[in-house]
Image (cartoon, rainbow, N blue to C red):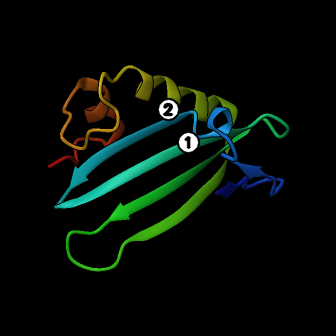
């Protein structure tokens, strides 16, 4: 579970409260999974970054608060992808989101 980066309230408690968007990408052999959560009370996003390292320990970190306009734009971009949870997807949305860093 992740907490709102502004108010500290838990996010993602139930199925309907999970991340509003998730995208995965492979970069230099590692898999990056970025999950976007929205806090309705604060009107901000919190992003969970998970890095599954090819060699070494995995890493999990949080980022935020991210303003609603920025988060809405990222979520809309992710929603353009037909397979956002595939690290092998190379659709335009994946390429734009990861800035050309994909394997």
Circle 1 sits on which residue? 36
- Spatial CA distance of label 2 from label 1 is 9 Å
**Residue 74: assigned label:** 2
Asked if residue 62 lies left or right of residue 85, the reply is: right
Q: Are marks 2 and 1 in contact (CB under 8 Å)?
A: yes
Asked if residue 48 lies left or right of residue 79, the reply is: right
Asked if residue 98 lies left or right of residue 27, the reply is: right
Q: Which residue ends up furthest to the bottom in the rendered image?
A: 56
Q: Is residue 53 above or below residue 83?
A: below
Asked if residue 61 lies left or right of residue 25, the reply is: right
Badge 2 crowding class, 10 Å Cα cut-off, few under 14, some 14 to 19, many 20 or more, is some
- Residue at position x 66%, y 45% in the image: 12
Q: Nearer the viewer, residue 11 or 45?
A: 11
Badge 1 crowding class, 10 Å Cα cut-off, few under 14, some 14 to 19, many 20 or more, is many
Give the percent coordinates (x, y) of residue 9: 81, 53
- Residue at position x 72%, y 55% in the image: 5
Give the percent coordinates (x, y) of residue 96: 31, 32
Q: Nearer the viewer, residue 79 or 74?
A: 79
Q: Nearer the viewer, residue 92 or 54?
A: 54
Q: Is residue 44 above or below residue 46?
A: above
Q: Earlier in the sequence, mark 2 or mark 1?
A: 1
The kind of secondary structure element at disc 2 is helix
Tell me where residue 86 sits by quadrant.
Answer: top left
- Residue at position x 57%, y 49% in the image: 47
Tell me where residue 58 sits by quadrant.
Answer: bottom left
Task: State which quarter of the image contains the N terminus.
Answer: bottom right
**Nearer mark to the viewer, of 2 and 1:** 1
The kind of secondary structure element at disc 1 is strand
- Residue at position x 21%, y 34% in the image: 89
Q: Is residue 85 above or below residue 25?
A: above
Give the percent coordinates (x, y) of residue 55: 20, 76
């Amino acid at each position: 579970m992740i907490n709102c980066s502004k108010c500290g309230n838990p996010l993602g408690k139930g199925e309907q409260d999970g991340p509003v968007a998730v995208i995965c990408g492979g970069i230099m052999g590692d898999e990056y999974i970025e999950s976007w959560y929205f806090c309705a009370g604060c009107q901000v996003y919190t992003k969970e970054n998970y890095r599954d390292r090819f060699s070494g320990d995995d890493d999990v970190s949080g980022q935020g608060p991210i303003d609603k306009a920025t988060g809405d734009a990222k979520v809309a971009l992710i929603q353009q992808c037909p397979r956002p949870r595939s690290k092998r997807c190379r659709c335009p949305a994946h390429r734009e989101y990861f800035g050309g860093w994909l394997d």
